[in-house]
Image: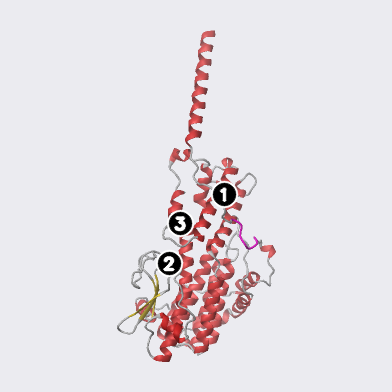
């Protein structure tokens, strides 16, 4: 009996020793999945606000009031109808639904314009449990302002049309201040739609010189107000790190998040590693644009399968990084595309002014600067060089950015793959729109 106990004790000691050795080996081979990046500012420059901190008469408060006053929400059918009006120059009385939508939402539009006039407002920074219904409603208000602008342009009120489109841009930009990536993407959608409507109005009929100059100034101001991507990512970090705090016992995390990770294994290393992730994203966003820079970094966060994740230090942090990291690369490209759109729209307006005065398009964009139609040739945000211009033998022209691949493809875009080809703004925009609409039957009233 004593011998059996002695053998069992020795066996237990051997097992404990082997287990200790295995743990020691495991600890020695585990690797950090992210390294610190000193010198990168993680805290936003703007204050982090809660909804209770915002005055009802501030821009965001008025935006909420405008959304509450909405009686009908614009649909894709309304957008289609506006596009047809701009492309074909049809009588607005042929689309009573649009006129009715504007009449029904007159109070909402009034409040939206008041919000836009407040300048750069700020939204409350979202947390894990926040719902963001105002994002979709802001887009609806911007669509209504675009509809109103198209109607006014058709009636000869160019200044009123410009005011409405400027308000639509302002409205979207309220969301980006204090907002995360999703807020910024809605801002970009509002801005790009307003720019597109303005270009189509100018291509239908050249704007009066005073209106064109005012439009150039407002587009330049809109460009200056566009919230930088690094600041957007700083607020994304505020959101992600606050979500981590909610994962701790008693933190109140939502069921979806808490069931995705082993909450009991969240440590101080987890928060530190996530902060390092955001620092890397901000650093990439602050650097000159390189295609696939974000993709290369995000590939490092690919979660190992099965037991291999245990070879990483702080595996829970890696799981959370995959859940919380924004698609920063797509957000940066959308941001630069929006900048290019604002700048190219300025160039389009200047070309139209030159054409209206001389009867011919310019030979190059420098000719617009010499003629006083453009203060300077706008720069392409994707490569830091001037926007390109191509004049075709038939007199049509193209202004273009090299786009996401940062390669000059000769002013040829890719309708199938937006990551390939150039970002093109052409004098044929209305013709291309008419050809597109010819394939789509008009929505029934």
Foreground: 129 or 156? 156
- Does the magenta-highlighted stretch encompass residue 59? no
The image quadrant that residue 266 belongs to is top right
Can see residue 30?
A: yes
Look at mark 1 in the image and give the residue it sits on.
Answer: 255
Q: How many marks?
A: 3
Look at mark 2 in the image and give the residue it sits on.
Answer: 383
Rendered view: 413 above or below 331: below
Whole-percent x, y for residue 352 in the image: 43, 85
Whole-percent x, y for residue 310 in the image: 48, 38
Q: Which residues are magenta?
A: 42-48
Q: Residues within 10 Å of mark 2 (few under 14, many from 20)?
A: some
Sequence order check, earlier mark of 2 and 3: 3
Sequence order check, earlier mark of 1 and 3: 1
- Does the magenta-highlighted stretch encompass residue 44? yes
Whole-percent x, y for residue 84 in the image: 42, 81
**Label 1 vs label 2, nearer the camera:** 2
Label 3: which secondary element: helix
In the picture, measured across the screen, residue 379 lies left or right of residue 127, that is left
Sequence order check, earlier mark of 1 and 2: 1
Label 1: which secondary element: helix
Look at mark 3 in the image and give the residue it sits on.
Answer: 294
Distance from Cα at disc 1 to Cα at disc 3: 30 Å
Rendered view: 408 above or below 283: below
Can see residue 82?
A: no
């Amino acid at each position: 009996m004593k011998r059996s106990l002695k053998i069992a004790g020795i066996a237990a000691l051997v097992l404990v020793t082997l287990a200790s050795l295995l743990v020691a080996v495991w600890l020695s081979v585990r690797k950090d999945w992210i390294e610190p990046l000193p010198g990168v500012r993680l805290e936003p420059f703007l204050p982090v606000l809660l909804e209770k901190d915002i005055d009802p008469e501030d821009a965001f408060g008025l935006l909420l009031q405008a959304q509450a006053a909405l009686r009908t929400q614009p649909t894709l059918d309304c957008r289609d109808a506006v596009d047809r009006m701009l492309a074909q120059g049809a009588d607005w009385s042929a689309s009573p639904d649009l006129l009715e939508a504007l009449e029904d939402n007159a109070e909402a539009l009034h409040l939206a314009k008041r919000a836009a006039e407040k300048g750069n407002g700020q939204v409350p920074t979202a947390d894990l449990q926040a719902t963001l219904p105002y994002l979709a409603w802001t887009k609806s208000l911007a669509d209504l302002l675009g509809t109103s602008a198209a109607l006014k342009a058709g009636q000869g009120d160019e200044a009123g049309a410009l005011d409405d489109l400027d308000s639509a841009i302002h409205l979207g930009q309220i969301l980006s201040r204090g907002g995360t990536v999703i807020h910024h993407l809605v801002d970009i959608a509002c801005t790009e739609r307003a720019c597109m409507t303005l270009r189509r109005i100018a291509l239908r009929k050249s704007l009066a010189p005073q209106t064109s100059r005012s439009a150039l100034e407002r587009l330049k101001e809109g460009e200056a107000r566009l919230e930088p991507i690094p600041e957007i990512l700083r607020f994304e970090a505020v959101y992600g790190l606050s979500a981590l705090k909610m994962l701790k016992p008693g933190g109140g995390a939502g069921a979806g998040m808490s069931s995705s990770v082993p909450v009991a294994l969240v440590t101080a290393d987890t928060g530190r590693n996530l902060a390092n992730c955001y620092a890397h994203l901000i650093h990439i966003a602050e650097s000159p644009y390189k295609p696939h820079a974000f993709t290369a970094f995000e590939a490092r966060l690919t979660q190992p399968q099965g037991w291999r994740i245990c070879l990483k230090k702080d595996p829970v942090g890696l799981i959370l990084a995959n859940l919380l990291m924004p698609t920063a690369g797509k957000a940066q490209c959308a941001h630069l595309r929006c900048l290019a759109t604002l700048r190219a729209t300025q160039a389009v307006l200047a070309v139209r002014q030159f054409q209206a005065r001389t009867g011919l398009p310019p030979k190059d964009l420098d000719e617009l600067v010499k003629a006083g139609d453009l203060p300077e040739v706008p720069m392409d945000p994707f490569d830091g060089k001037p926007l390109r211009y191509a004049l075709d033998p038939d007199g049509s022209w193209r202004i273009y950015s090299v786009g996401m691949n940062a390669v000059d493809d000769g002013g040829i875009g890719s309708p199938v793959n937006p990551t390939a080809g150039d970002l093109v703004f052409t004098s044929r925009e209305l013709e291309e729109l008419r050809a597109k609409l010819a394939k789509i039957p008009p929505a029934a009233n």
